[in-house]
Image (cartoon, rainbow, N blue to C red):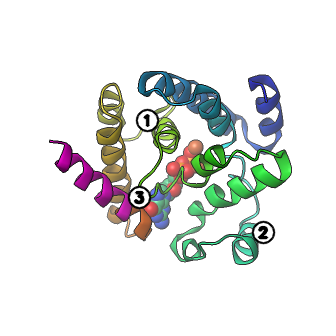
Amino acid sequence: MDQKKALQIVKPHLTEHRYTHTVGVMNTAIELAERFQADKKKAELAAIFHDYAKFRDKQEMCALVESSIEDKTILGYGDELLHAPCGAYYVEHEVGIKDEEVLNAIRYHTTGRPNMTLLEKVIFLADYIEPGRQFKGVDEVRKLSETNLDEAVIQALDNTVSFLMKRRQLVYPETIATYNELVVKQKKEK
Ligand code: DGI
Ligand code: FE
Ligand code: FE
């Protein structure tokens, strides 16, 4: 699917602000894919559809998790997590994208997962550092992403987990597992 067609499909599902974010994620994902030798077309496609389900009805998404999504534990960790796995499902069944690598990049873009693929890291990071993002600590992650993909993902996870804890929100265990796996890997590489 070409970029124009994909953007046309996703646009009616998003607000203007979220559409601008999506275009930012797309451009950033293509840049990161180039830098770290990931598949640029897959990065582009996954980025365009990563927030496809952002505005879907929460009850509908909870029901979908109950009926069709393997990992039901996300139901216990806040509604914000639903749009990633449910998005992957809708993108497969409504848009017809069957590429499992692209679907997984959408599925894990919010929480990450241990042993993320290169493409999954590219989308996870692009979502975090696209030019429209302004939260505290984002510049540090932008800087790291110029040279070291794993260090950048670790820092983004650190920021997100710290942010959640400050607000006494629950932290999804797989997010912590992602952090642990990458830190162990980094230590081995040093
Ligand atoms: O959809 P976006 O806003 O572009 O970004 P996103 O998919 O990373 O979602 C961000 C939201 O997800 C934000 O409210 C924090 C929340 N979040 C991210 N990781 C976790 C999390 N919430 C919980 N409970 N646990 C997590 O591990
Ligand atoms: Fe998202
Ligand atoms: Fe996003």
Mark in front: 2 vs 3: 3
Q: In the image, is residue 84 above or below residue 16? A: below
> Answer yes or no: do the residues labelled 2 and 3 have beta carbons within 8 Å?
no
Q: Which residues are magenta?
A: 177-190
Name the residue: 63% across, 30% down. 44
Identity of the residue furthest to the left in this view? 190
Q: Quadrant of residue 93?
A: bottom right
Tell whether position 155 is magenta.
no
Q: Position of residue 5 (x, y in %)?
A: 82, 28
Labelled disc at residue 60: 2
Residue 162 is situated, as x and y percent measured from the top left of the image, at 31, 57
The alpha-carbon separation of the residues under discs 2 and 3 comes to 28 Å
Q: Label 1, label 2: how many angstroms apart (C-alpha)?
A: 31 Å
Q: CA distance from mark 1 to mark 3?
A: 27 Å
Q: Could you tell me the amino acid type at mark 3?
A: Pro
Between residue 106 and residue 118, name the one nearer to us: 118
Name the residue carrying label 1. 134
